[in-house]
């Protein structure tokens, strides 16, 4: 149970236009937020905005929530992470995830299979390179040196001496096997959704072997509105998009995790409506108690009451999304304490 919750600011990735959230990040740092997080899908990348905010802050920790494995080789991620960690004075937490086959094969043009095996190898190489060991790996996915090229490849060391030889790594995972793997190879887990009243049940076994200090940093949309139904609707639009559009019809990991929460029939209906083009109907088909369980919605007094439920879960850090109002940032920081 995470009675001592931490609070992060989840900025995610940009929409159609560039989004400089510096003022929001500074307000979050001023009122005591522990961290700020960026993400990437197939638009803005995660590292560049985070570096921008790092240069404008002094205390707040920096997290990628998350960086996609297929976007960069392990060596490229190791260099970028070590560079940002050095520039920020050791403030980086590296969130990693495999994404899904639509993005991996359709956007990056690399194969998706064996995501757990690829993740293990990727993390292993990152840690070796940060320790300044030579770039040698017998991984089937990331062999170093590359075995079938010019045969001139050489095992070399990172020239930069990292300020930390073990930058914290969190794994973005939805399936139980992937979550269990995170407890074995990483410093924490980044769920995309966690139901405050149901999540402890279907992830209990996967988290059973988590070591002391294991972090669970969970994105939680905060929708402040005196009308609870309107606040929930904001969350339901996002859920409809993830359930219906963020993944192939035959393989959508977001739909699957919603099903494991007990909403399989509703999720199937949402997906069908979304893919048919009726997005408003898809939003309305998202159950209210699903949206309410993964988010904090309504007037501030209700959010304060619902926040207490999160202290009884394995979540150690709430990554608050959807907040730009400085008064609401301060109010949430005061609630978390």
Image (cartoon, helix red, strand yellow):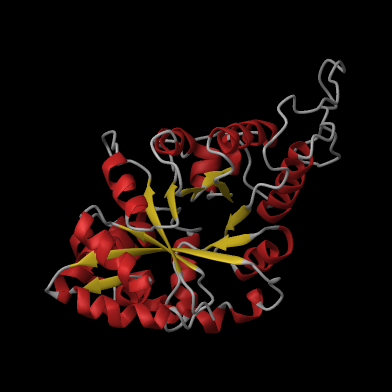
| 139 is higher (above) or lower (below) than 323 | above
Residue at 25%, 67% (x, y): give it.
Answer: 331
Residue 234: % across, % down: 22, 63
Residue 300 picture quarter: bottom left
| 78 is higher (above) or lower (below) than 193 | above
Residue 1 picture quarter: bottom right
Q: Residue furthest left?
A: 227
Position of 178 compared to 294: left or right?
A: right
Residue 104: % across, % down: 55, 42
Position of 159 compared to 105: left or right?
A: right
Q: Quadrant of the C terminus?
A: bottom left
Residue at 79%, 41% (x, y): give it.
Answer: 128
Q: Is residue 278 visible?
A: no
Residue at 53%, 37% (x, y): give it.
Answer: 88
Residue 186: % across, % down: 68, 58
Residue 260: % across, % down: 50, 76
Q: Nearer the viewer, residue 334 or 125?
A: 334
Position of 312 compared to 115: left or right?
A: left
Q: Is residue 318 visible?
A: yes
Q: Nearer the viewer, residue 17 or 303?
A: 303
Q: Nearer the viewer, residue 259 or 217?
A: 217
Q: Nearer the viewer, residue 292 or 218?
A: 218
Position of 213 compared to 18: left or right?
A: right
Residue at 63%, 67% (x, y): give it.
Answer: 214
């Amino acid at each position: 149970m995470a009675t001592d919750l931490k609070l992060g600011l989840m900025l995610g990735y940009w929409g159609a236009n560039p989004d400089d959230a510096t003022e929001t990040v500074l307000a979050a740092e001023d009122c005591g937020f522990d961290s700020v997080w960026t993400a990437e899908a197939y638009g803005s990348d995660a590292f560049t905005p985070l570096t921008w905010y790092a240069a404008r802050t002094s205390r707040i920790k920096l997290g990628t929530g998350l960086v996609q494995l297929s976007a960069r080789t392990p060596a490229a991620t190791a260099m970028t992470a070590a560079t940002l960690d050095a520039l920020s004075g050791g403030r980086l937490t590296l969130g990693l995830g495999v994404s899904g086959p639509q993005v991996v094969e359709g956007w990056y043009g690399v194969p998706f299979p064996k995501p757990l095996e690829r993740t293990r190898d990727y993390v292993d190489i990152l840690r070796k390179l940060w320790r300044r060991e030579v770039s040698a790996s017998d991984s089937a996915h990331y062999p170093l040196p590359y075995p079938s090229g010019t045969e001139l490849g050489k095992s070399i060391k990172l020239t930069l001496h990292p300020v930390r030889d073990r930058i914290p790594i969190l794994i973005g995972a939805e399936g139980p096997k992937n979550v269990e793997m995170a407890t074995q190879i990483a410093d924490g887990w980044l769920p995309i959704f966690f139901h405050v009243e149901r999540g402890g049940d279907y992830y209990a076994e996967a988290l059973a072997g988590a070591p002391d200090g294991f972090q669970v940093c969970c994105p939680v949309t905060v929708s402040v509105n005196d009308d609870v139904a309107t606040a929930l609707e904001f969350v339901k639009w996002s859920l409809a998009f993830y359930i219906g559009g963020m993944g192939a019809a035959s393989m959508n990991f977001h739909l699957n995790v919603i099903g494991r929460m007990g909403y399989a029939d509703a999720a199937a209906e949402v997906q069908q409506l979304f893919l048919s083009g009726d997005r408003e109907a898809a939003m309305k088909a998202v159950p209210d108690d699903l949206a309410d369980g993964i988010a904090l919605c309504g007037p501030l007094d209700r959010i304060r009451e619902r926040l207490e439920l999160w202290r009884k879960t394995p979540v150690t850090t709430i990554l608050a999304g959807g907040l730009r109002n400085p008064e609401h940032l301060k109010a949430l920081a005061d609630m978390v304490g």
